Image: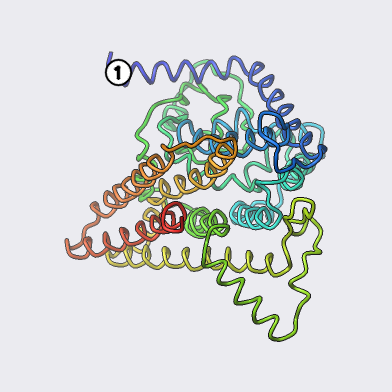
Amino acid sequence: MSSLSLRNRLLQQLGDGMRRHAGLIRVMQWAVVLFYALLLVLPALLPLPDSQARMLDNLTLFAQFLFWGIWWPFVLLSIVLFGRLWCGVLCPEGSLSEWASQYGKGMGVPRWVRWGGWPALAFCLTTVYGQLISVYDYAQAALLILGGSTVAAVVVGLLFARGKRVWCRYLCPVSGVFALLARLAPVHFHVDEQRWKENTAARLPPPNCAPLLDIRRMQGASDCHACGRCSGQRGAVQLIARSSNEEILHSITHTPSPWDSRLLLFGVIGLAMGAFQWTVSPWFIALKQYLAQWLVEHDILWPLHDNAPWWLLTHYPQLNDSFSWLDGFSILLYLSASALILGTGLWLLLRLAARLVGQAEMFGPLSLALTPLGGAGLFLGLSATTVKLLRYEGLLLEWVQPARAALLIAAMLWSAWLGGKLLAGQKTSLFRRGVAGACLLAAISVVGYGWWLQFWGWL
């Protein structure tokens, strides 16, 4: 038996085991819900830590480290490694939404909920709002945003589709991001549609696919929540190993949604880069100083006041940390400019590359080729909080900069390889493919330069 066959056999047993031990998974889900609630609610009820507080003697700082330093960065990493296993097995919002839907009204899912742009819009709004109220730094802000999202998930569960996860499928702010990153997973639940239709043997009871997927026609890992409930169904569904490049390279024949490209270019890359870098950007400082000078010269002083409530703009005067109205406007302007300028630049370069090879529909697959770079950027940005908190504890972490460089270079090379493979299959002249490849490399270089500025250029 080949190593690949043995691996797939073991994976199939794992997938079937997930279905058999669904009860154990439910216990795990509720344990995560309890841990999530404690991590989110308890620190918000405690006094703000003073400047001398440390992670090991202050519950608020320890919870902040667990939540933003460990939880979220490694949730992203888990999606790349295992697909959306987090969504199907561990996500507290998904568990609560599905549980609530069992006791709700069970209404049908209206068309406006099924609009494909909600995940992209929700991601952008949540990201911007989180920066305005310093979600990474204060427990109250985290409770407001993440707790508010959890309440919304429960409300949606109470309203629509009994026993399902309507929130996760259509409205979750990170659902679109997870769908992008899951395309890189080296494992997924594969469905053989022909075998599904032909199998006349004894069948398992129909599974409850909580994210409302048509299991028979499911392709790839982007939408599947990897919960294991359908493993073995009609002998046509099994967990298998695959190439991490497979789903993106096959996107030529399975045209991705235009919202995938918009979210990746304008949100995951453009907006996220601005959100992670504005605190260290000299461009942001120059922008704010210019606006402040203009306001003073025109005797407009109220935007310089820092009297906004904490739930609108960061306001913790006891820690000398309060945003003025000008700060809030400058953050909005900087993040919007980052999303629009960088996203539009990438969009134009990839559109040009697609036109050069004579296939306008190649834009979608070429944009997905930047998924490794987008995912690496999110991990670098979120793990910067991990590094900051550990350095507050006195750890030098001299290996961090080389590790960041290695991750960034690897992601750039991976994206370049994916784009090169997509372009190599096009039937056009070598010159046109070469110029299209140059456009792709320019797009990758622009993103890499942005991260270089944050971690090296602006130090």
Asked which quadrant contains residue 305, the reply is bottom right
Tell me how many marks there are.
1
Q: Toward the viewer: 335 or 352?
A: 335
List the residue tagged with mark 1.
3
Element on which disc 1 rests:
helix
Instruction: Pinpoint residue 189: horizontal percent, then vertical percent.
Output: 47, 29
Q: Amino acid at mark 1?
A: Ser
Would residue 107 be visible to someone looking at this image?
no
Side of 115 relative to 354 (left or right): right
Q: Toward the viewer: 88 or 276?
A: 276
Q: Is residue 248 above or below residue 33?
A: below
Asked which quadrant contains residue 301, the reply is bottom right
Q: Is residue 27 above or below residue 162?
A: above
Side of 276 relative to 208 (left or right): left
The quarter in which the N terminus is drawn is top left
Q: Residue drawn 73% across and 45% down?
A: 108
Q: Toward the viewer: 331 or 171?
A: 331
Q: How is the image coloured?
A: rainbow
Instruction: Pinpoint residue 394: horizontal percent, then vertical percent.
Output: 56, 36
Q: Residue drawn 49% across and 34% down?
A: 83
Would residue 130 be visible to someone looking at this image?
yes
Instruction: Pinpoint residue 362: horizontal percent, then vertical percent.
Output: 35, 58
Q: Residue drawn 41% across and 54% down?
A: 452
The local crowd at label 1, few if under 14, some if 14 to 19, many if 20 or more residues have their Cα within 10 Å, is: few
User: In the displayed image of the protein, which residue is found farthest to the bottom?
Assistant: 298
Q: Is residue 416 above or below residue 227?
A: below
